[in-house]
Amino acid sequence: MISQRQYASRRRDLMAMMQSNSIAVIAAAPERIRSKDTYYPYKQSTNLSYLSGFPEPQSVMLLIPGRQQGEVVFFCRDKDPLRETWDGYRQGPEGAVKNFGADDAFPINDIDDILPGLLEGRDRVYYSIGKDAEFDRHLMEWVNGARDIHGSDLTSPGEFVDLDHLVSEMRLIKSAAEIKLMRKAAEISARAHRRAMQTSRPGLYEYQLQAEMEHEFMLSGATGPAYTSIVGGGKNGCVLHYIENSDKLRSGDLVLIDAGCEYQNYAADITRTFPVNGRFSRQQAAIYDIVLASQAAAMEMIAPGLEYHLANEAIVRVITQGLVDLKILKGDVDELIARDAHRDFYMHNSGHWLGMDVHDVGDYKIDNHWRIYEPGMMLTVEPGIYIDPHNMNVDEQWRGIAVRIEDDLLVTANGYENLSAEVPSDRQEIEQLMAS
Ligand code: GLY
Ligand code: MN
Ligand code: MN
């Protein structure tokens, strides 16, 4: 759990980075209708979660450094016994003060009357610019409202600054409490992958392995999947974000599972590829071992002080060499690398930051230079080889084979720690687990 003390300290850190005489406006995510009058499960905006842990929709938090009556102001839904009977508990403004560190809190219905007065006299507004058109419009109305208070624009903010940039930099380096939650997310997800490996057999449907995974997630206290689970048997694995999960699994095929849970707002993101029937064919084994070797080479490039792109370069080299060895690519390895020949078979990158968002926030480059790893960063390393079933330039024996291997790494003082190592990726270990 993230303590209220930690949320308060994050808000203080953010306010310390804001320029003088400014205000930050952080809105809850909108609720989204799935069908007629039922909604998608609610997902709080990750920035509001990060800065407050406040779980409810229809809320807005303001950070107003230096405000005499208190720097943290909330707007949220009022208590409403009838609505709470139908939809569940509400904190109400009292709860925002008592449980979420607000100095002041008001009903969200009063925001149009109150917020312009709080903007008055501030020079600049920090907010997530352009992420939610409706919120953008509201904010302009409030700013214009502040203008109207004295009939002059001298007292209203004239400058808008992107809040996300500041918060993203904070979120990129995980605290001890965050690492603990992410460790747990990875641990649950690894257990689910083991379960899927042990359950797999020809004749099952992809969605049945998905169910095994997600069953394990929820049994273990995760909210559910952090993103739509991908279970692709055979050539379906060639579709990078295949989510139909509707086909029957066939003996002799591989199955690629890319699934991770969300645990207390933090994501895991793990991929394993294994034979449906428990035994790799010669061709599958050959492709698999290249991907695994490329991942090992990439992981050697992950340590404080090393640049982000080196992992991908390591992957490209190992994959290109491997495909040349198998005569799937033909030519000189350096020349093939120079012209990105791997792109037909490995068309994504080494991975991404991982955190509250599965593709987490944080820049990969700063002033056009690749970012350098620092302890506390969390990232995936996920090379893959996908041989299009219709690729007539490749000998038939290879077509339709897809392999991705993805792990979740924490950058430590000396290198990295693999948080998802509990699920085997070694070929023999997978076969052993599946046979047990
Ligand atoms: N699950 C999407 C990804 O691996 O990035
Ligand atoms: Mn993934
Ligand atoms: Mn990923």
Image (cartoon, grey):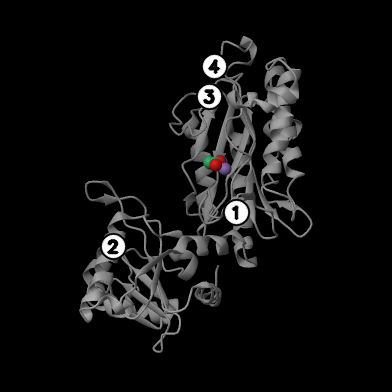
Residue 210 falls left or right of residue 23: right
Q: Secondary structure at mark 2?
A: helix
The count of marks equals 4
For badge 3, the amino acid type reads: Leu
Task: Kindly report the distance in space between the C-alpha atoms of the residues bearing marks 4 and 1.
Answer: 41 Å
Residue 276 spot, x, y in % from top left: 60, 26
Residue 312 spot, x, y in % from top left: 67, 38
Asked if one can make out residue 157 in the rendered structure from this viewpoint, the answer is: yes
Q: Are marks 3 and 4 in contact (CB under 8 Å)?
A: no
Q: Nearer the viewer, residue 180 or 158?
A: 158
Q: Residue 367 bears which disc, if any?
A: 1
The residue under label 3 is 249
Please report whichever mark, 1 or 3, sits nearer to the chain's N-terminal start. 3
Please report whichever mark, 3 or 4, sits nearer to the chain's N-terminal start. 3
Asked if one can make out residue 106 in the rendered structure from this viewpoint, the answer is: no
For badge 4, the amino acid type reads: Pro
Task: Kindly report the distance in space between the C-alpha atoms of the residues bearing marks 1 and 2.
Answer: 47 Å
Hey, which quadrant is residue 355 in on the image?
Answer: bottom right
The residue under label 4 is 389
Q: Secondary structure at mark 4?
A: loop
Examine the rendered structure and indicate whether residue 60 appears above or below residue 283: below
Residue 182 falls left or right of residue 59: right
Q: Nearer the viewer, residue 98 or 307?
A: 307
For badge 1, the amino acid type reads: Asp
Residue at the far right in the pictured view:
414
For badge 2, the amino acid type reads: Asp
Q: Residues within 10 Å of mark 3 (few under 14, many from 20)?
A: many
Examine the rendered structure and indicate whether residue 216 appears above or below residue 271: below
Task: Kindly report the distance in space between the C-alpha atoms of the residues bearing marks 2 and 3.
Answer: 40 Å
Q: Secondary structure at mark 3?
A: loop
Q: Nearer the viewer, residue 417 or 372?
A: 372
